[in-house]
Image (cartoon, helix red, strand yellow):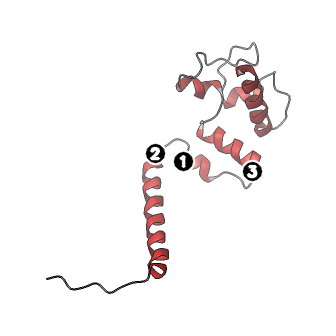
């Protein structure tokens, strides 16, 4: 016959349980992403305002709205930049040089390109 368990208040156990769950989840994420090419890039993201940090994250992980990524997902049919006539693959390297973009910083150019691409799509 089993011995009865001592009753424990949920409030006393919940913080310990949540911490253990969080630590386990973080460990799993670290293991899964250890070999990703962007792993070291996102660890060194500067402490920027949100709009810059989000753009930096998208550029670092290559999960962005640029044609190179959208082509991998089979959302667009061409890798080429639809904003200019250069015919180059639209990725973060092209973002720096695209003549259709007027902004100075790479982060501002990312948001400008995103806005222009959405206008083209609609």
Alpha-carbon span between mark 1 and mark 3 = 20 Å
Would you place residue 7 above or below residue 103 in this image? below
User: Which structural element holds mark 3?
Assistant: helix
> Residue at horizontal 71%, vertical 17%?
82
Give the residue pinned by disc 3.
50
Task: Answer whether residue 96 is visible to the viewer in this image.
Answer: no
Give the residue pinned by disc 2.
35
> Residue at horizontal 69%, vertical 13%?
87
Q: Are marks 2 and 1 in contact (CB under 8 Å)?
A: yes
Q: Which numbered disc, 1 or 3, marks the residue closer to the eye?
A: 3
Would you place residue 2 above or below residue 42 in this image? below
Label located before the other in sequence (3 or 2): 2
Q: Are marks 1 and 3 in contact (CB under 8 Å)?
A: no
Query: Is 61 on the left or on the right of 113, as rendered?
Result: left
> Residue at horizontal 39%, vertical 84%?
8
Q: Position of residue 70 (x, y in %)?
A: 59, 26
Label located before the other in sequence (1 or 3): 1
Q: Position of residue 100 (x, y in %)?
A: 81, 21
Quarter in which the N terminus is drawn: bottom left
* Mark identifier at residue 98: none
């Amino acid at each position: 016959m089993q011995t009865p368990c001592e009753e424990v208040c949920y409030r006393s156990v919940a913080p310990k349980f949540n911490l253990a769950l969080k630590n386990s989840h973080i460990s799993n994420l670290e293991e899964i992403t250890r070999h990703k090419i962007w792993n070291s890039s996102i660890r060194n993201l500067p402490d920027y305002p949100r709009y810059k940090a989000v753009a930096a994250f998208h550029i670092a992980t290559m999960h962005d709205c640029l044609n190179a990524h959208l082509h991998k997902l089979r959302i667009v049919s061409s890798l080429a930049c639809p904003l200019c006539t250069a015919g180059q693959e639209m990725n973060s390297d092209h973002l720096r040089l695209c003549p259709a973009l007027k902004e100075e910083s790479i982060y501002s150019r990312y948001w400008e390109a995103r806005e222009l691409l959405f206008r083209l799509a609609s």
